[in-house]
Amino acid sequence: MVMSGVVGHSTDLVEHPELVAERLVNLAGVLGKENVQAGTDCGIGSRVGHEEVAWAKLRSLGEGAALASTRLWT
């Protein structure tokens, strides 16, 4: 099982859910879909500039993971 860092902590740029999904689908193509989990590349708590950015990144992570799940499991 691999929890891949599909959203970053070193920038305030919020990844689009489609980008998150693409990263997860690509990883699943290598490791197998049952072996992939979505995560941050490191803890984002105090590492991003604003609390709103951290929450936006986590929202994008969830939305992207849902898109990837739909693509991989249907």
Image (tube, rainbow, N blue to C red):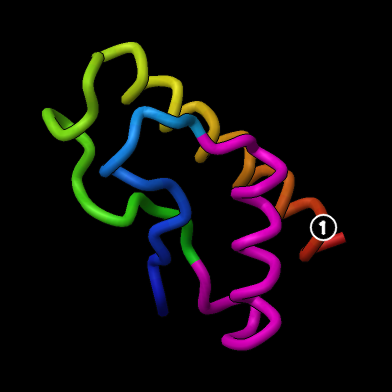
Quadrant of residue 24 within the rendered picture: bottom right
Q: Position of residue 62 (x, y in %)?
A: 54, 37
- The quadrant of the rendering that contains the N terminus is bottom left
At 66% from the left edge and 43% from the top edge, which residue is drawn? 66
- Which amino acid, mark 1? Arg
Q: Is residue 4 left or right of residue 28?
A: left
Determine if the magenta segment contains residue 5: no
Q: Position of residue 55 (x, y in %)?
A: 37, 21
Residue nearest the viewer, comparing 73 with 38: 38
Residue span colored magenta: 15-36
Q: Tell me: residue 55, above or below residue 48.
A: above
Residue nearest the viewer, comparing 55 with 35: 55
Q: Position of residue 44 (x, y in %)?
A: 22, 37
Q: Is residue 38 left or right of residue 40?
A: right
- In this figure, what is the number of numbered marks? 1
Quadrant of residue 74 within the rendered picture: bottom right
At 33% from the left edge and 37% from the top edge, which residue is drawn? 11
Q: Position of residue 34 (x, y in %)?
A: 59, 76
Q: Which residue is mark 1?
A: 71
Determine if the magenta segment contains residue 29: yes
Point out the residue furthest to the left here.
46
At 78% from the left edge and 65% from the top edge, which residue is drawn? 72
At 47% from the left edge and 55% from the top edge, which residue is drawn? 6
